[in-house]
Image (cartoon, grey):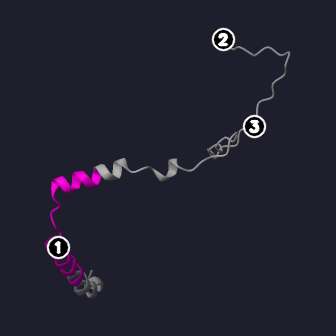
Amino acid sequence: MEILWWLAPAVVVTVLTMLWVGWLGRANRGQVDRDIAVQRLGKGLRAPHQGLSRPTPAGTRPPERSTGVAVRPSRSRPNEQPRRSA
């Protein structure tokens, strides 16, 4: 424990600096008028979404999402009946 006493000044300075910066940050935080905030929110919700405006070529499917699991395609035989288990 005695070996770690050299850390005490650094810890005290760090804690005091955190408290000081936290106190300064409170003073600069301004209040936004509720009506203005609602107008900004409405404007943002009415704006067109950029991801929806990108056209996709006709006849193409979006790529399948990889699950990270390799799955072999099943072999289907045209004359074989599906197996049923009890």
Magenta span of residues: 13-41
Single out the mark in the foreground, 1 or 2: 1
Residue 86, numbered circle: 2
- Label 3 vs 2, first from the N-terminus: 3
Is the C-beta separation of discs 1 and 2 under 8 Å?
no
At label 2, the amino acid type is Ala
Label located before the other in sequence (1 or 3) = 1
Residue to which mark 1 is pinned = 28
* Mark 2 residue element: loop
- Quarter that holds the C terminus: top right
Q: Amino acid at mark 1?
A: Asn
The correct choice, above or below, for 72 with respect to 44 in the image is above
Residue at 21% over, 81% down: 17
Nearer-N-terminus badge (1/2): 1
Q: Is residue 62 left or right of residue 15?
A: right
* Placement of 34 over or under 77, stated as above or below: below
Note whether 85 is above or below 27 in the view shown: above
Q: Nearer the viewer, residue 71 or 38?
A: 38
